[in-house]
Image (cartoon, coloured by chain):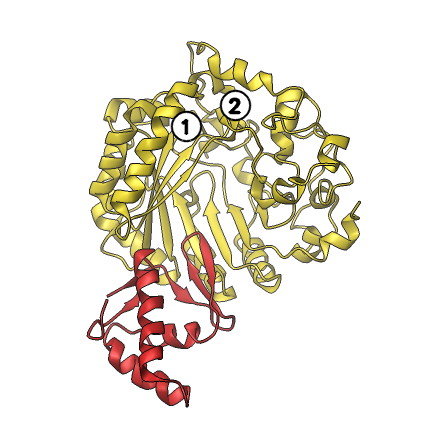
Chain colours: A red, B yellow
Amino acid sequence: MDLNATPRLAPGCRLHPTEPVLLVPEGTLNLAGPARDILTQLDGKQDVAAIVDQLLRQYAGAGRGELTGDVLNLLNRLEQRGLVRA
Amino acid sequence: MVTTAALSSSFKPFSLIAEVTHRCPLHCLYCSNPLELQRTEQELTTADWVRVFEQAAQLGMLHVHLTGGEPLARKDLPQLIGAARAAGLYVNMITSGIGLSAERLATLVDAGLEHLQLSFQDIDEASANHIAGSRVHALKLALVPILKRFPLAFTVNLVVHRMNLDRLGAFIALAEELAPDRLEIAHVQYYGWALKNRSLLMPTQEQVDRSIPIVEAAKARLKGKIHLEAVFPDYYANFPKACVGGWGRQMMLIDPTGQAMPCHAAAVIPGLRFDSVREHDLAWLWRDSPAFNRFRGDGWMPETCLACPRKERDFGGCRCQAFLLTGDDEAIDPVCGFSPHHSLLQTLRAATPELLPVWRDSSVSRT
């Protein structure tokens, strides 16, 4: 996955409406730190660069480079598990 | 020693297994349903299940697994799915797919179904149908392209045992062609009908040893494409499994008549009485019902387990298995190398199969 990818949650995966938890087939992933805010942005249309822009507005003071790395790291890990699709 | 009163309030259940019916068009040799199947006229009503799902969500449960029997045998399945989803639960259905058309599936997905699990019995049609006790293999294969049109997570479950474990490589290749999101390789667990057929189903040590590198290779090959989970049979281990995540620690099962149980097999334990959702709410059943507190904590454990640090990991293993193999529900799980009965398992896996399979009784599925 790179900055031009337009990720979305895989079928059968969704964010819990109130808890910081991703509901997935046969399990749950506890979302630490900004992970929930990142996943909330996924709609299959917005690319990763736009997601980072959005998060930079939300987390004033965060560095673009570091945040981009965090976002790609999370999305790639979830893609490997089949929970996010590019 | 930890008291059960202190414990029952500290455990939060994650998932609800809703056995909505015991009716089923299949008669699998390895079925984990109890030998005494519950009859249709005793099944909970739609309103009962709606109340159960609401209470489950209030208790903090996140997932509901609709199973049976065959959940499709219930005409009110769309209402059940809708109620579970409206309550906030993640809705999974474990099905044979028999009776599922594109139209019916559309109704279920619209109602809120999120994940569907379909099991396969073998690669070859004759053998698969023999194991399922009905001609269903071709129907299951035909259903897969229909499933894939829907926004649904799809798991293929390969149920393995002595009769098909030698074909595991080809079995995984078949599953790969079906291209599910998830693939589960599940060894038969010896309860219910599977226990009756144990000598036919239990693989030899050599079969299990040969299967391990096949699973490992498939995991590596499928990484990033299909998420593979393999459940190995604990009969071949030296330490027991933390059965159902520990008795009364993570999950609750409601049987078709409303009995709340800590696991699928708990009814085999003599003297254990199960309270019903018809008389009690789930919070009481979870915290206070005698069945859920029976093996919580370590008060029941034999000396060997009490002194063992692994009790924090396996919570004393499986109580049903201990009873079924030793006749004592408080015995050390015989899977454990410290059990005086551990050699029993070596005898069992060396045993020559009996010749006649026993399919689950079909009489209750006629309504």
The reply, left or right, for residue B182 in relation to residue B334 is left
Q: Residue at x 22, y 70 (%)?
A: A2
Height in image: A68 above or below B80? below
Report the residue marked by disc 1.
Answer: B27
Which corner quadrant of the image does residue B300 belong to? Answer: top right
Query: Can residue B279 be seen in this snapshot?
Result: no
Identify residue type, mark 2: Leu
Q: Quadrant of the N terminus of chain A?
A: bottom left
The reply, left or right, for residue B1 in relation to residue A6 is right
Whole-percent x and y of residue B104?
A: 31, 52
Q: Secondary structure at mark 1?
A: loop
Query: Can residue B41 be seen in this snapshot?
Result: yes
Subunit of label 2: B
The reply, left or right, for residue A68 in relation to residue B319 is left
Q: Residue at x 23, y 38 (%)?
A: B141
Query: A14 or B166, which lies in front?
Result: B166
Whole-percent x and y of residue A40?
A: 38, 75
Identify residue type, mark 1: His
Crowd class of label 2 (few under 14; some 14 to 19; many from 20; radius 10 Å): many
Q: Tell which circle, 1 or 2, labels the residue nearer the N-terminal end.
A: 1
Q: Are marks 1 and 2 in contact (CB under 8 Å)?
A: no
Q: Which mark is residue B195?
A: 2
The reply, left or right, for residue B142 in relation to residue B342 is left
Q: Which mark is residue B316?
A: none
Q: Residue at x 75, y 44 (%)?
A: B290
Whole-percent x and y of residue B50?
A: 54, 58
Which corner quadrant of the image does residue B6 belong to? Answer: bottom right
Which corner quadrant of the image does residue B200 belong to? Answer: top left
Crowd class of label 1 (few under 14; some 14 to 19; many from 20; radius 10 Å): many
Q: CA distance from mark 1 to mark 2?
A: 14 Å
